[in-house]
Image: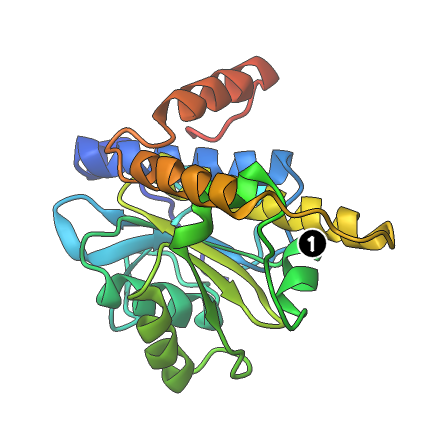
Amino acid sequence: MSVTTLPTKNEMSEAEWQTRCDLAALYRIVHHYKMTDLIYTHLSARVPGEPNTFLLNRYGDMFDEVTASSLVKMDMDGNVIGDQSRFNLAGFNIHSGAYKARPEINCVMHTHTRAGVAVAATERGLLPISQHVMLIWNDISYYEYGGPGSIEEANAMSEACGKTDCVVMRNHGLLTMGKTIPAAWFRMYYLELSCQIQATAQAMNEPLHYAPQEVEKLSIEHYTDRLQAASLGELEWESLLRMLDRQGADYRA
């Protein structure tokens, strides 16, 4: 039986290793916030200085098992670089499609949360009923589910990803992107929380209260500027890394 040799810090650039550590941390953070679906769904990051390659989780690993060295390095054609071999084909199609559509994007997140799929299954989708959703309101698009990942699905996904940084995948889940890992996480956190708030509000079987249109408009305009900041999510990200360190997480291994 062949034994897979995991890459080490000394075998790659400092920038790639740091990206591996940050992406592994992202997996642990998503696990902490209970946004996982067993071994399914996936988060990725483009390798610095190598625009045609990205890192993805090894298929079969739970999110709280992912480490910097366990991540699979791939190119946009689906070729694995190194000794790793297991990866989720549907995940590759989604992530490669996003990277091809958006050369400036360096991180992609995809989840199948209960609240996310529930809202994705409603005809109207997200509603402007909380300040959380207003924060990302102008950055959300919708994508019609076309079945399990395929090349055709990847091409269609590319088109959807070219419009916004947050995508509600009908009957499927959520997807966010960012120029940085913290930015992609920031968007996913608020997209997921918006879905949770809406699912809870609708379950109360009471009429929904919408903010006055002028307040909604001002809020959306204010938050739209914030989303364009180069430092989006960085302050929150540093606090989350401190949380992982307090927990003794071994994601840097």
Is residue 57 in sight in this rendering?
Answer: no
User: Callout 1, which amino acid?
Assistant: Ala
Please give the name of the residue rendered at 45% of the width and 38% of the height, measured from the top-left corner: 219
Residue 22: x percent and y percent?
Answer: 37, 33
Task: Look at mark 1 in the image and give the residue it sits on.
Answer: 115
Relative to 250, say whether 98 is above or below: below
Is residue 208 in sight in this rendering?
Answer: yes
Q: Is residue 232 left or right of residue 220?
A: left
Residue 168: x percent and y percent?
Answer: 52, 63
Q: Secondary structure at mark 1?
A: helix
Residue 66: x percent and y percent?
Answer: 51, 42
Query: Seen from this angle, which residue lies furthest left?
Result: 49
Please give the name of the residue rendered at 16% of the width and 55% of the height, measured from the top-left corner: 51
Residue 76: x percent and y percent?
Answer: 25, 68
Q: Which quarter of the figure has residue 153?
A: bottom left
Q: Nearer the viewer, residue 133 or 62?
A: 133
